[in-house]
Amino acid sequence: MTPTPTEPSPTEPPLTAPSPLPAAPRRRRRPLAAVALLAAAALTAACSNSSDSSGSSGGSGGGQTLSGDCATYQPYAGHGGKTVTVFASILSPESDNLEKSWADFSKCTGIKISYEGSNDFESQLPVRVGGGNAPDFAIIPQPGLLAQMVKSGKVVKPPAQTVANQDKWSPVWKTYGSVNGTFYAAPMSANMKSLVWYSPKAFKQAGYSVPKTWAELTALSDTIAKAGGGKPWCGGIASGTATGWPATDWLEEVVLGSYGGEVYDQWVSHQVKFSDPKITAAMKTVADWMQNPAWVNGGYGDVKSIATTTFQDAGAPILTGKCFMLQQASFYKAQWPKDTRIGPEGDISAFRLPAVDPSVPSPVEGGGEFLAAFASRPEVQAVQNYLSSSDWASSRVRTATGWVSANQGVDKSLYTDPIDRLSADALTDPSATFRFDGSDLMPAAVGAGQEWKSLTAWFAEGQSVQKTAADIDAAWPQ
């Protein structure tokens, strides 16, 4: 499950704050590893970090004058010797790259950013905030958790420069960092979910072309099934206590690609129920796709095997020719073996999942992370301004592949990985119908609870669409 937005508009009503949320399983949680943080690139000797570190409003520069390579950080100067704490769910080695992204900023301004990552972030953040031990910042991957923190009264509104930096994002992203129409948290990262992973080599050998429409995707799936050998699709929704979340993505993709953003928003807010004919029709579309015994589950078994196959292992049969396609997000790239060549001419690549209804303009489902502040000291505001800027986003892109931003100020040439570039293009496409992950927008009891349970039963037990929908609707908080 990835976070989903809070929209103050009539079609995207504000989120209510859920009770403590479980860890977001779709967020890549990389195990702690003894990976040394690479030293920040040496700055030119002309770089100056002198003068006083007395408080001035974040971004004023205070009395500190920076020169040489450091001059670009002048707007954030004036707070040397101060420390700002950041708490998040991002673990090593990904957190190593995160810390690299602000290393030059820290060296030049003298502001130390003390980072802490935890597997228990979602459960620990409310405890720390409630106990008076809040970090200066939390990087929150769920708008629902942001709403809960705002309800605590401890989240501080961002400074004017952070607000202005949102001009580089599509307006809808600002709503995802807002609660009840008030902006609190600047978006930092994004991930693209509307992807299909496949083997260019296998497609070429079989004479298959990448489909551009849902009709072409359906026809290709049927052709592969009739050809024998590998199945057209592989899939897995097992994820420990979060089993079921990939199935929520499949349903979200079909709802958005069938009806567009307005119906999607109404469904996420329960104005349109799961038992509504539109949603049950979307579930039928998913069943025709991922519950078709002739189409799934290459390399693992029948339809029921999808419920017991982990999402991490789901795509492996593509490399052995036992299945041809897997629908998963951009972050799935981390699951391929290290020696896998990624790209249009490689072992594995990806294409955009087409809209079910071709009249829906470029549907894109995604997720992301948001920077929420619990303090308003000048040095905290300086860091907040920097981490919400296009300059920081560009620095983050340079640190590693597999990370993308929906910030339109990032130079696309910085994306050297083809899947990152594809994802970034989709996320910054002004004509796209973009929506945040729906289950993460729903109350936790539904999107991270009953929906996982019911969709798992739908696959594992062949539970009916009607019972599946009714059970999820019944779990919605009154």
Image (tube, rainbow, N blue to C red):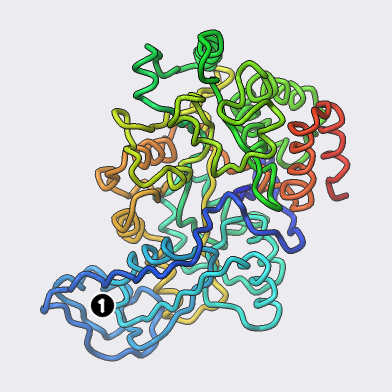
In this rendering, the answer to whether 377 lies above or below 270 is below
- The residue shown at (79%, 36%) is 457
In this rendering, the answer to whether 51 lies above or below 158 is below
> Where residue 172 sits: x, y (%)?
53, 44
> Where residue 89 sits: x, y (%)?
55, 64
Q: On the picture, is 113 further left or further right than 276?
A: left
Residue 319: quadrant of the picture: top left
Q: On the picture, is 225 further left or further right than 149?
A: left
> Where residue 306 sits: x, y (%)?
66, 33
Q: Looking at this view, is 428 or 211 the one in front?
A: 211
Q: Looking at this view, is 478 or 366 the one in front?
A: 366
Q: On the picture, is 211 further left or further right than 178?
A: left
- The residue shown at (38%, 83%) is 56
Residue underneath mark 1? 108
Number of marks present in the image shown: 1
Name the amino acid type tagged 1. Cys
Q: Looking at this view, is 258 or 403 the one in front?
A: 403
In this rendering, the answer to whether 113 lies above or below 402 is below
Please rate how many residues cluster around mark 1, counting C-alpha atoms within 10 Å: few if below 14, some from 14 to 19, many from 20.
many
Q: On the picture, is 267 further left or further right than 2?
A: right
- The residue shown at (42%, 84%) is 83
Q: Secondary structure at mark 1?
A: helix
Q: Looking at this view, is 213 or 297 the one in front?
A: 297
> Where residue 164 sits: x, y (%)?
42, 58
